[in-house]
Image: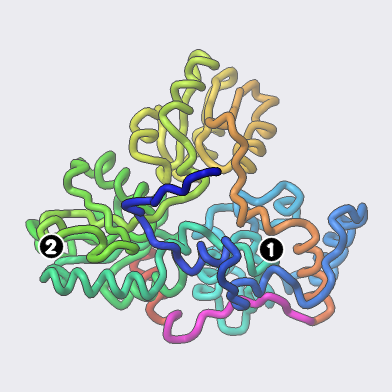
Amino acid sequence: MTTAHPVQDLDVQPTPLALLLLGREADPKSERGVECPGDLPSPSDPDLVERARAAKEKLGDKVFVLGHHYQRDEVIQFADVTGDSFKLARDAAARPEAEYIVFCGVHFMAESADILTTDDQKVVLPDLAAGCSMADMATAEQVAECWDVLTEAGIAEQVVPVSYMNSSADIKAFTGRHGGTICTSSNAKRALEWAFEQREPSTGKVLFLPDQHLGRNTAVRDMGMTPADCVLYNPHKPNGGLTDEELRNAKMILWRGHCSVHGRFSVDSVNDVRERIPGVNVLVHPECKHEVVAAADYVGSTEYIIKALEAAPAGSKWAIGTELNLVRRLANRFAAEDKEIVFLDKTVCFCSTMNRIDLPHLVWTLESLAEGNPVNRIEVDPETEKYAKLALERMLALP
């Protein structure tokens, strides 16, 4: 007989999402995208590509399809433009003549597109269950409670929130209400510089949401701070797991969130690929852990990674620490130029939520739109949109 031992010093308490995944709770709203209000085509239907092409052709200029870099090849082939989340949201805003914006990405991206497009445009997400684990790590209630903690510690007036693009509309709105800005992995340094300029230099602080690694890497690697200048706020612990003194002494208050894909990469991954491929260049995304970023040769956003490989000399070797769909696509693209491109980790790792957008969902979406039946529309309420847009506009105004 096995003896059960008590588990001590649990780091976190089960969240509603965790209980849902464990089957101990039910949340119909969170499951609304699992079943579509209609039958999806069979994944084995050999006519899927032709059906998608025919529906898109029928829609013509009425539809504009956005494809995030992490999407499957079978989906990305139908994208009118490809890019990272913010580039795609801006591309959507630049096409006011398109009645329908089909966002092949995840929920927070479609929200941003809805915020930046006109009221007449309808933003559609092919599968409502395509979320983002990082964005889900910071809820509006948790962040409001954090602000109460900062207020009680007497430092809220010294804090400027900076939220990563990979956050919900609610978090973007919180940021806008409290005088903060949004950032991308490309402009995080400038956003942090701007935030510190808004407060007294000796006492100013930033609350960085929701990705701790991008915040830490930008502060330490790009801005010359030390790890001691950063504290980690854990929303599952009383007072965030921090003392008032720790909060007062910190320059960067990092939210305890991370990307489930980029968080997989380790220093062992870097060391292993250097052993296997002599002369390899290690290029990683800044959502990776700080020790991985420190061990890499190059660090940059998705767009930076693509441009670095475009500029790389023939015969060069690269190990890329980002989502596998993109790495594989880049490896195929540059094979003819004799550039060897491999995934940094030996373990295959797709973004599971991005991969919910597959060809059957896209076909169902396009055919429904072609029949005049918009499905899975993403709409941000006016109050949330007002303040989220304010935070986004502050980012757009950054030099």
Q: Which three-letter amino acid code belongs to the residue tagged 2?
A: Asp
Residue at left 17%, top 73%? Answer: 151
Numbered disc 1: secondary structure: strand
Q: Residue 61 in the image: x percent, y percent?
A: 74, 70
Q: Vertically, is 75 above or below 334? A: below
Total numbered badges shown on the rendered structure: 2
* Residue highlighted by disc 1: 65
Do we see residue 270 in this rendering? yes
Residue 390 seen in the current view: no
Looking at the image, the residue that sits furthest to the bottom is 382
Which quadrant does the C terminus fall into? bottom left
Q: Which residue is mark 2?
A: 244
Q: Residues within 10 Å of mark 1 (few under 14, many from 20)?
A: many
Q: Nearer the viewer, residue 399 or 249?
A: 249
Q: Is residue 178 above or below residue 316?
A: below
Closer to us: 175 or 67: 175
Q: Position of residue 366 (x, y in %)?
A: 78, 69
Residue lying furthest front = 1
